[in-house]
Image: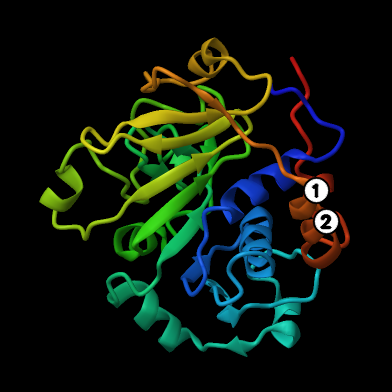
């Protein structure tokens, strides 16, 4: 397990790691169960990307800002949003416009070595061992956004599997050029952030590889907790933890009630 810090919670770290990769002027869409994703977008807006705007996929609220982290679909976001778009307009953006959104940030029940994600269920559809929210537009977001991020609050062999039970969101499919060969636009997953590290995808094979490991995490540990072979660079970097400025902005302007720390603490060692 990571060296658990008393200075920041897991949810805070994941939000910071996502926020660092977001750029000014970009357009984003965020799904329903999305506290960490919302915090990441709003933190980026407070730091390096004031012109970034994000919209709630299920609610149409744009840039709700009150210093309180709520799920993107929460109706309390409406009075503090800069705008609210109605459903027909949202469908036009989500389902038909290739690369209208620069990125989406998505969670999943499962992800595999090529960044395909499953949010329907684990196991047989008729008798699943775990049922999720369904596809809920994820197929369009992963297919049409310029890129997407996968945010996982657990990293184990149940979540990181050789092949997902259902492809709800297309990543790099079977690797290589299989995504574009299937007729999908260029794009796919860019980063995967988890309690153990940050992962990206090799340019040619499109297989998941280790980018950085969080402080205290070993290569052996992350391999043991992953159900497929990860590409491992010759020299591994350590994830830079949240710095004082990032934590100050996160807690004083984005998450003033401490939602991330309460809901997403570091996992306890087994």
The foreground one among 42 and 171 is 42
The foreground one among 122 and 161 is 161
Residue 167 location in percent, x, y? 33, 45
Residue at image x 58%, y 69%? 49
| Left or right side of 216 for 150 | left
Quadrant containing the N terminus is: top right
Tell me the quarter of the picture where residue 88 sits.
Answer: bottom left
Q: What residue does disc 2 label?
A: 248
Q: Which residue occupies the extreme top position in the image?
A: 220
Residue 232 location in percent, x, y? 40, 20
Q: Is residue 205 above or below residue 25?
A: above
The colour scheme used here is rainbow
| Left or right side of 31 for 208 | left
Residue at image x 40%, y 67%? 102
Residue at image x 77%, y 54%? 245
Contact? badges 1 and 2 (CB < 8 Å): yes
Residue 84 location in percent, x, y? 59, 88
Q: Which residue occupies the extreme left position in the image?
A: 181
Residue at image x 38%, y 33%? 112
Residue 45 location in percent, x, y? 64, 69
Quadrant containing the C terminus is: top right
The foreground one among 77 and 251 is 251
Q: What residue does disc 1 label?
A: 244
Mark 1 → mark 2, Cα distance in angstroms: 6 Å
Q: Is residue 209 above or below residue 118?
A: above
| Left or right side of 179 for 165 | right
């Amino acid at each position: 397990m990571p060296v658990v810090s008393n200075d920041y919670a897991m949810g805070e770290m994941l939000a910071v790691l996502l926020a660092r990769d977001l750029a000014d002027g970009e357009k984003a869409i965020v799904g329903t169960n999305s506290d960490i994703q919302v915090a990441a977008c709003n933190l980026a807006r407070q730091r390096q990307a004031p012109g970034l705007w994000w919209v709630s996929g299920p609610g149409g609220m744009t840039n709700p800002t009150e210093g309180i982290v709520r799920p993107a679909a929460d109706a309390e976001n409406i009075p503090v949003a800069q705008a609210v778009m109605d459903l027909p307009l949202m469908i036009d953006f989500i389902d038909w416009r290739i690369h209208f959104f620069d990125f989406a940030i998505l969670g999943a029940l499962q992800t595999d070595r090529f960044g395909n994600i499953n949010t329907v269920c684990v196991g047989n559809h008729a008798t699943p061992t775990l049922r999720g929210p369904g596809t809920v537009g994820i197929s369009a977001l992963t297919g049409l956004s310029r890129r997407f991020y996968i945010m996982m609050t657990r990293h184990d062999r149940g979540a990181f599997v050789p092949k997902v039970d259902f492809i709800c969101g297309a990543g790099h499919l079977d690797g290589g050029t299989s995504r574009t060969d299937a007729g999908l636009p260029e794009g796919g997953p860019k980063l995967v952030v988890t309690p153990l590290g940050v992962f990206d995808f090799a340019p040619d094979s499109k297989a998941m590889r280790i980018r950085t490991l969080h402080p205290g995490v070993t290569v052996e540990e992350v391999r043991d907790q992953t159900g497929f072979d990860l590409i491992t660079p010759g020299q591994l970097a350590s994830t830079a933890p949240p710095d004082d400025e990032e934590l100050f902005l996160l807690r004083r302007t984005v998450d003033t009630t401490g939602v991330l720390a309460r809901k997403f603490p570091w996992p306890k060692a087994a």
